[in-house]
Image: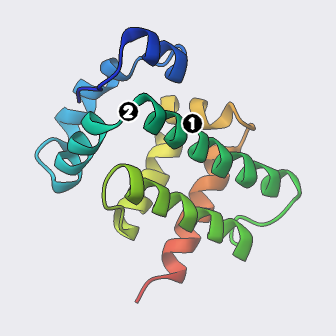
């Protein structure tokens, strides 16, 4: 997945996270899917300002979910599920159509791939698991 950013922009936006290193793996896993095709087209057209907005929105959702977790709110509660829904809409808006099945898959990836777990838990330890429960509860809430 090619990003329309300079090396300096990437360093500023992503810090020590190297998106190119993970792009090959992601393409091997999901390349050829509709979600991959749409995501590749969207990310290629994103400007530095778009990426800044995208990452700021994602961080805001994670921060608010972490605050709920730290306050003792259940991941199966309305507030956590509402943030999970906001997370799903965020992915749909910026990356690819994220239906509830795809969102469930992401929830599992957040706790089964140590790289995802570590990145999410940087906000607050245990947040990846809390995210998973909130996402799965939200998907169940919206199941037909």
Residue at 54% of width from left, 82% of height from top?
141
The one of 73 and 108 positioned closer to us in this rendering: 73
Q: How is the image coloured?
A: rainbow
Q: Disc number at residue 64?
A: none
Q: Which residue is mark 2?
A: 47
User: Residue 119 placed where, x, y %?
Assistant: 58, 31
Residue 73 visible in the picture: yes
For the residue labelled by badge 2, is the local secondary structure a helix, a strand or a loop?
A: loop
For the N terminus, give its image quadrant.
top left
In three-dimensional space, the C-alpha distance between marks 1 and 2, rounded to whole angstroms, equals: 27 Å
Above-or-below relation of 105 to 76: above
Q: In the displayed image of the protein, which residue is found farthest to the bottom?
A: 144
Q: Which mark is residue 117?
A: 1
Decide if residue 105 is on the left or right side of residue 90. Answer: left
Above or below, 67 relative to 5: below
- The tag earlier along the polypeptide, 1 or 2, is 2
Name the residue at 68% across, 30% down.
122
Q: Is residue 77 visible?
A: no
Residue at x-position 48% and y-position 56%: 90
In the rendered image, the vertical position of residue 6 relative to residue 106, given as above or below: above
Q: For the residue carrying disc 1, how many other residues have a C-alpha within 10 Å: few (<14), some (14-19), or many (20+)? A: some
């Amino acid at each position: 997945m090619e990003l329309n950013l300079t090396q300096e922009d990437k360093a500023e936006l992503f810090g020590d996270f190297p998106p190119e290193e993970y792009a090959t793996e992601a393409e091997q896993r999901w390349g050829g899917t509709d979600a991959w095709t749409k995501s590749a087209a969207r990310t290629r057209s994103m400007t530095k300002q778009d990426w800044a907005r995208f990452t700021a929105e994602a961080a805001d959702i994670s921060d608010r979910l972490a605050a709920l977790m730290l306050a003792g709110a259940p991941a199966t509660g309305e507030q956590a599920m509402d943030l999970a829904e906001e997370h799903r809409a965020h992915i749909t808006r910026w990356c690819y159509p994220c239906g509830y099945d795809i969102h469930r898959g992401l929830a599992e990836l957040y706790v089964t791939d140590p790289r995802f777990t570590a990145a999410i838990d940087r906000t607050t330890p245990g947040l990846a698991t809390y995210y998973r429960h909130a996402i799965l509860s939200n998907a169940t809430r919206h199941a037909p």
